[in-house]
Every structure is written in structure tokens, then in C-alpha cells.
Image (spheres, grey):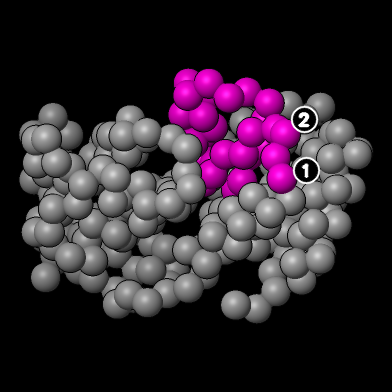
Amino acid sequence: MPDRTILIAEDDLVILDAVRRYLEHAGHRCYCAADGNEAGQLVAKHRPDLVVLDWMLPGIDGLTLCERWRKSDYFAPILMLTARSKEDYRVRGLLAGADDYLVKPFSAQELVARVAALLRRAYTHGYREVKQGCGLTINRSTRQVLLGGKSVELRFKEFELLAQLVECPGRVYSRDELLERVWGYDFEGGHRTVDVHVRKIREKIETDPTHPVHILTVWGVGYKFLGLP
């Protein structure tokens, strides 16, 4: 994998410098921001391949930045840094658009490993690029989903989850398997993360999300996708 550009947004300058050194040692090029306003400007200017984002930034907090970026056309993976370890906070960060969650304090090895995993999943394509059928078109190259010819706005992990499900239509994926394939084997969240993302996708692609015809629940196991060849 080629070296990538990474934005580090962290107001604790000691942590900021340490993260920069860890990632530069791993071969990446880094931009640094100590507040949310600067982070927003750097993303607009440089379009980094990944963002390491502190939750409690001054100016514009990390959660708000996540939401703004995911509502725009910026879908690079985001690794959220925070001292908040409760599951509810992790879920809030993921729903805002973060792709992974790292609780302070953390080791250099774990940080670098999580960044590498996010980059690998985001920029390595071993799948058929375009799949279509039943009014849906899913393009992995452009990360675009069309429903009846109209664009469907999916957040980064929503797209990754949908792309994983449609790769093998009719196959039943357990929640544990989806967590590993989409979020990574070292992700600390639970089954609720998968369920929440499935619900969000259904709201966007199903005519009646309470009676889905594309993403079906297999009770006691997980989910399967029907509708694409």
C-alpha cells in the first residue's frame, strides 16, 4: 500500500506531536491541527486519505466535524480519539461518521495498526466495482449508490457494510463476521453497532424499512442481502 496523507486533529500538543511521530515513522505524511476550524480548513485544502480526530476539539468539536464531512463529499476514514470509553459514546461517534474509535491512553503500536487497517479496507479493492439490479446500482470506485437512478447518500461505514452484504447476495453474514470484515477484528464495539448501521441503510434504500426486501434479518444469526445478481 502506498504511503498516505493523514490529518491529525488534536488540541493536546503532546499527544499531537506523539501521534505525528508515530505515523511519520510508519511512512505517512501528516498535517496537524490543534482546533476544529483548522482541521476543517486542512481537509478542504488537502483532502487527506485519513483523519485522526479528537472528540473534544476547541472551535468545532470532532463529532460535529464528522457529521459535516459525511454530509458533504468527504468520505475518507476517520479514527476518533477520546477519553470516553463507554459504549454509548462509541456508538455516537460511529453514527456521526467515524470508522473506528481509540480510547486514550493508547499505545503507538495500536494506533499504527488501526490506521493501517482503516487504510487497507478503504483503499484496497478486491471486489467487482459495479453491481446492479432491482433498481439499485452500487459502484465501489466512486462509492456511489443509486436507487431508481437517484443518488443515495451513505456514510462511510454504511457504504462499506452494504458493499460487503451485496458481494455475496443470499449469503448469511453473522454480526461477528460483519464486525470483523467492516470494522476490523480489533474493533471494540458490539452487535449493536451492526444493527444500528443496518437500520440506517434500510431507511435509505428500502421502500418500507419496517418490511425490508433487500437487507433481511436472519434471526439469531445476522443479515443477508437479496436483490443483486
Position in image of residue 12 (x %, y %): 86, 33
Residue occupying image coordinates x 57% and y 39%? 101
Q: Is residue 221 above or below residue 181?
A: above
Whether residue 13 can be seen here? yes
Q: Is residue 49 above or below residue 217?
A: below
Tell which of 58 and 53 is nearer to you: 53
Amino acid, disc 2: Leu
Tell which of 109 and 136 is nearer to you: 109
Position in image of residue 204 (x %, y %): 28, 41
Amino acid, disc 1: Ala
Boundaries of the magenta span: 78-107
Q: Give the CA distance from mark 1 to mark 2.
A: 8 Å
Label at residue 57: 2
User: On the image, numbered disc 1 is attached to which residue?
Assistant: 9
Q: Is residue 187 left or right of residue 48?
A: left
> The C terminus appears in which quarter of the rendering?
bottom left
Tell which of 118 and 149 is nearer to you: 118
